[in-house]
Amino acid sequence: MPTSRKTSKRLAAQRPAAQRPAAAARPGAGRRAKRDAVDARAALLSAATRLFAEQGIAVTTTREICAAAGLNPGAIHYHFGDKDGLYRAVLTDPIEQLNAELAGFDDPALPLRDMLKRVLLPFMADDDHPDERALMQLFLNEMQRPSPVFSQVFRELIAPVHERMAVVLARHMGLDAPDASVNQLLYGLQAMAHDYCLSRPLMDLMTPGWLDTPGALDAVGERLVDWGLVLIEHEKRRRSATQKTPKKTAR
């Protein structure tokens, strides 16, 4: 038999303290517990990102991570299940954030220039936070020697977005579907933007202060979009010329 809200409150007040929900005994305890859980999760992700980047996943222990995060040794099991679960979260969280920034790039109504801006500019990170630098190092390590966890995350979260990008690029080139040349062009377009993220420390060594002036990175991004338009137009002309070239007949 359902009870009214007043009846429920009265029955709860009559229960022994040990049987009452913690929130009833301590107003706001539920919110604090949720906030503490979020803080603990963030601390584990931050510590794990730095240690995984410095040492690699194989030699980094869960005890090291928990100690660096200032948490008890069982924290990883509670929040992520195991080390692989934690590593997956370290990889997927930034990828999911990036995919959110890319959202809408495949809108058929989006002009080509706007599509390129949507696709390229999110990769040009300008965050000098230690965790961001560690994350970049981690992804560089994985790009050279993909781990099983990264390979799975790549197939699930990155490959489908690349495939959609290739389809959109092919559509803008007047093609029914992407082929090897379209994928090669897409790799080249992405590489231009990736370099300003992954190779930023080297750029700072070769041209100190160049990208530190206000608006410098934004200007570079606009220029990369301009170059992207030129590359796409060049590929369209190359394909058109190839199709118009008459084939030689055998004598």
Image (cartoon, grey):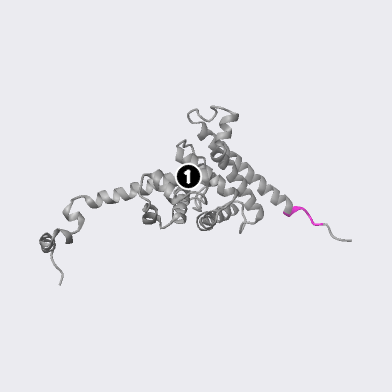
In magenta segment, residue 245: yes
Residue 135: % across, % down: 49, 44
Q: Which residue occupies the foreground of this view, 125 or 106? A: 125
- Mark 1 is surrounded, within 10 Å at the Cα level, by few (under 14), some (14 to 19) or many (20 or more) other residues, namely many
* Residue furthest bottom in the image: 1
Quadrant where the C terminus is found in the figure: bottom right
Q: Residue at x 50, y 29 (%)?
A: 212
User: Taking 5 as reference, is 207 left or right?
Assistant: right
Name the residue at 47% across, 29% down. 214
Identify the secondary structure beneath mark 1. Answer: helix
Residue 132 horizontal/vertical position (percent): 47, 41
x, y percentage for residue 102? 48, 48
Residue 87 in the image, given as x and y percentages of width and height? 47, 52
Give above or below for 8 relative to 161: below
Instruction: Find out whether residue 163 is within the magenta segment.
Output: no
The range drawn in magenta is: 243-247
Question: What type of secondary structure mainly makes up the magenta span?
Answer: loop
Q: How many marks?
A: 1
Amino acid type of the residue tagged 1 in the rendering: Leu
Look at the image and tell me in which quarter the N terminus lies: bottom left
189 relative position to 110: left or right: right
Res. 117 visible in picture: no
Q: Is residue 1 visible?
A: yes
Q: Say which residue label 1 marks.
A: 51
Residue 113: quadrant of the picture = top right
Closest to the observer, 223 or 46: 46
The front one of 76 and 181 is 76
Q: Is residue 64 above or below residue 19?
A: above
Q: Nearer the viewer, residue 34 or 239?
A: 34
